[in-house]
Amino acid sequence: MHILVRETRSLDDVESAVDLGQTPAELVFLSFSDSDLGAASAAWQADPNLPGLRLANLARLKHPLSVDLYVEQVIEHARCVVIRLLGGLDYWRYGAEEVARTCRDRGIPLAILPGDGREDDRLIELSTVASDIRDRLDACLAHGGPANTARALRLAAHLADLGPDDGEAAEPLPLHGEYRVPAPSDTGRPLAAIVFYRAYLLAADLAPIDALARELDRQGLDVRALHVASLKVPETAAFVAQTLRDRRPAVVLNATGFSARLDPRSGGDGPSPLDAAGAPVLQVVLSASPREAWAESARGLSQTDLAMQVVLPELDGRLLATAISFKAEETEVTGLEFARTVHTPNPDGIALAAARASGWARLARTDRGDRTIALILSDYPGAAGQSAHAVGLDAIESTAQILKVLDGEGYETGDALPDGKEIVGALCHAAPTPFLSLADYQRLFATLPEETRAQVLAAWGDPEDDPEFDGSHFALPMAIYGNVIAAIQPDRGNALDRKASYHDPDLPPR
């Protein structure tokens, strides 16, 4: 069988048949997890006594033709096969069944293991190795890391009659702990705490975390980093919460996905452990897609990244920063016919995330009377009565309540707090307010790529022709009430001359 290697990928592509081009080897290890494969690659390179090994990500073997070709070229010639199925059998049913059939026909030891800790009788039935051996393999790979993966590979070599059984069991590794980042700490500067998945540590895939730590240091922050298996594990959640309470960081940068709130029904206390710092929590994204796919997609991040690393974290009130890394292949390992896929730092994203963290840390040290706060409400120019309108949300009443909270916290909010009716009236009838000068607009516009500037001008025309341009400034498209969008400073009644919803490095910290 032959498949022509001619492939173009994007975030929205369906799976296509591919030929991995691997030659046979004694051992084969397949997994959906780049962390599993990275640990296996590191373990094999560190032990010259291990037999030949082939590694492949199951995500590249989803098409039935890809499976058939890989079985023909590699599996049929192996002497032991180990597969770790993250998500269970249904994520790779055809492949698992075809590999199992081939291994049974040819007498090849096969262990198909769950990748999420949930045992499945169907995986046991498809496997051909003894249950105690399968359990040992499962434990080694579940605990993870190069050392435990090396134990699994030596056991697989024994199953292949290529070495003795050393009897080693998996060595449990802590589910959480502190990671020493390549940046100074305890210098008396404001502290930034990074929280990331233990899987990155076990796979030695820490380049983005290290790069972020160095940039935070350059931005004037001390840095501490915590690794966690999952923030949903009560013991780990307690560790993170207590550490953050003790360290009292000025800002937390979180690199885990999903919502971290603990369900009270399962013994949790509700709030996310990240909230224990009493500080802003910035969500950084380690994208599972290549940078090229992100750049070429109109959507940017993939649906998976958006769900896991944007939407669900926002349920906890985390503030989205940006993507600090993208997936990319390293140079192929000689003799392994495998190039590890790792998280490659995104310098622009790391710089932006660190700058935002530094800004929040500066804000925490700024007296409340010297802070500028703005409430930005939606608007629909040209549709009367639509100011601050949001389907299913009472933005007007929320604004009134937020002003009450600010007033109670000691911010200067004016002589009298408006109620909802007063806010509506002010929004609907107040005159537009100067917002951005033409000179500032042109300075900021010049920082955009030339192609983007051309597209904007083609779509919207020259800025001087904008209906909101009064000859010197652009006006906000919605009317503004001084107590609603307020710069709360003792020496100013409001901040209609200090508003800015864009990022301008020349403005004082917000």
Image (cartoon, helix red, strand yellow):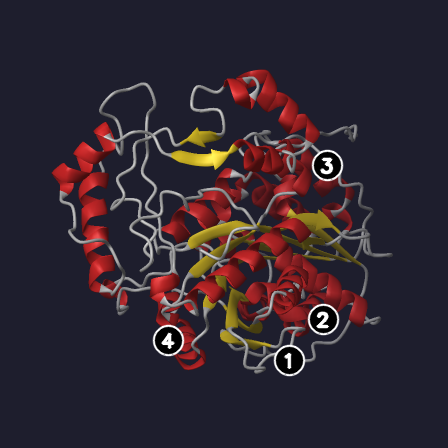
Q: Distance of mark 3 from mark 1, alpha carbons?
A: 35 Å
Which numbered disc flags the more N-terminal residue, 2 or 1? 2
Identify the amino acid type marked 1: Glu
Give me the residue at 57% from left, 43% from top.
97
Which numbered disc flags the more N-terminal residue, 3 or 4? 3
At which x and y percent is residue 223? 57, 73
Picture quarter containing residue 447? top right
Which numbered disc flags the more N-terminal residue, 3 or 2? 3
Identify the amino acid type marked 3: Leu
* Relative horizontal placement of residue 413, taking residue 272 as reference (left or right): left
Give me the residue at 71% from left, 34% from top.
18
Instruction: Answer few, some or many: residues within 10 Å of disc 1's Cα (few below 14, many 20 plus, some between 14 and 19).
Output: few
Identify the amino acid type marked 2: Arg
* Relative horizontal placement of residue 369, taking residue 449 as reference (left or right): left
Residue holding disc 4: 238
Q: State the residue in front, 21 or 236.
A: 236
* Relative horizontal placement of residue 71, taking residue 457 as reference (left or right): right
Determine whether the residue tagged by mark 4 lies in a helix, strand or loop. Answer: helix
State the mark number for residue 154: 2
Determine whether the residue tagged by mark 2 lies in a helix, strand or loop. Answer: helix
State the mark number for residue 168: 1
State the mark number for residue 391: none
Residue holding disc 3: 69
Which numbered disc flags the more N-terminal residue, 4 or 1? 1
Determine whether the residue tagged by mark 1 lies in a helix, strand or loop. Answer: loop
